[in-house]
Amino acid sequence: MHGRGRRMARFVAIVASLGVLAAGAAGPAAAQARKKVVVAVGPSSDMALLIVAVKKGFLEQQGLDPQLKIFDSSPQALQIVVSGQADITMNTEPPHLGARARGGKVVQVMTGWVSGRNAAIVVRSDAITKVEDFVGKTIATQRGSGSNYHLVWFLARHKIPADKVTLKYMAAPDQIAALARNDIQVFSSWEPYVTRAVQTIPNTKLWSRAGDDGVEFRDNVLMREELAKNDKDTAVRIVRGLIETADWMNANLREAARVANEVLRAPSEEDAYRELQLFQYPGDFRKSVFEHQLKMAEWAVSLGLFTAPDPKKLVEELVYPDIIKAAAPHRTDM
């Protein structure tokens, strides 16, 4: 090789080695640039959207570093976000309203699912065979939950005075054992606790689902207010990832059930699939959410579940459409 050729070969080798070094340096830097997002969930099917968003990589594809944290129930996951130890979670309207009313710096940024089938009332069939039998019975629900709302609605619809039943507030997972012991004869809860009770406790049956009683819930994505308002780029990435997750789940529900069941731990993937069929995943945020949540806020205040001098202002502070307007303006009419 001539001198000039050797110099050129050496030059090419040096450039190539610099390229390798640069790529190596960029790798950790790129990883460091990924914003960590802590996603708080419970092991129930109402959390499937968030579970799939992490497990299938939809949030990671948005340049985020999602960390899935699993808690005993969705209300517990909500409290973790309120405390600032997590960034996002999901829940039905009443718990979110209560959290905001009590000073929690959290906002709703999109609707994850809509369903009238997830919440339900379960009874001991040896104690209740007709609506009138609810009188004098002990009924459990989780205080301030969507199922609490469903129960109050159910009693009013069937003209059962609240003072004619004994109401016990307890965490959703504890209601199954209480029903088995006959400490309670009825509970108002959500999946998977509803089906688990019917499948495992003799003389137990599902009385009605929320939709049968004219109740529909919108489970909204809750985000730390500081993140939503002070780190809009990250918030927009989260919402984009969740919208893509919702669209994918609608088209691939059975696969979504398989992925979600890594956390749900349902007896089988078929059971998980059955539960996910109870939901619709719109991946949007519509202005109808205001009126819907205002009714629930007024109900909760009337029962003393929380204090809010102006329920309308409470809803306006909680619902925050700015992020979805930036992420996917065609998914909102606000």
Image (cartoon, helix red, strand yellow):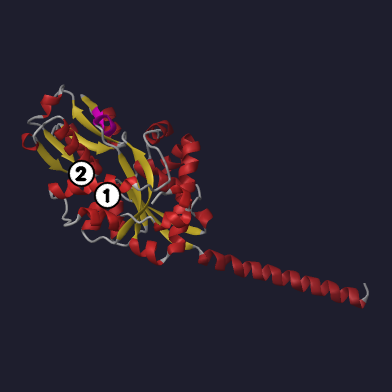
Q: In this rendering, does residue 54 appear at all?
A: no
Is 161 on the left-hand or right-hand side of 79?
A: left
**Does the segment drawn in magenta span residue 209?**
yes
Q: In this rendering, does residue 289 appear at all?
A: yes
Q: Nearer the viewer, residue 31 or 302?
A: 302
Is 4 on the left-hand or right-hand side of 92?
A: right
Going by the numbered disc 1, the residue's amino acid type is: Pro
Q: Residue at x 50, y 50 (%)?
A: 58
The label shown at residue 75 is 1
Helix or strand or loop: what does disc 1 sit on?
A: helix
Q: Residue at x 47, y 52 (%)?
A: 328
Q: Residue at x 42, y 49 (%)?
A: 332
Residue behind mark 2: 142
Looking at the image, is 5 positioned above or below residue 136? Answer: below
Q: State the CA–CA distance, disc 1 to disc 2.
A: 9 Å
Is 101 on the left-hand or right-hand side of 59?
A: left
Looking at the image, is 66 positioned above or below residue 283? Answer: below
Label 1: how many Cα within 10 Å (few below 14, some 14–19, many 20+): many
The stretch of residues the image draws in magenta is: 207-213
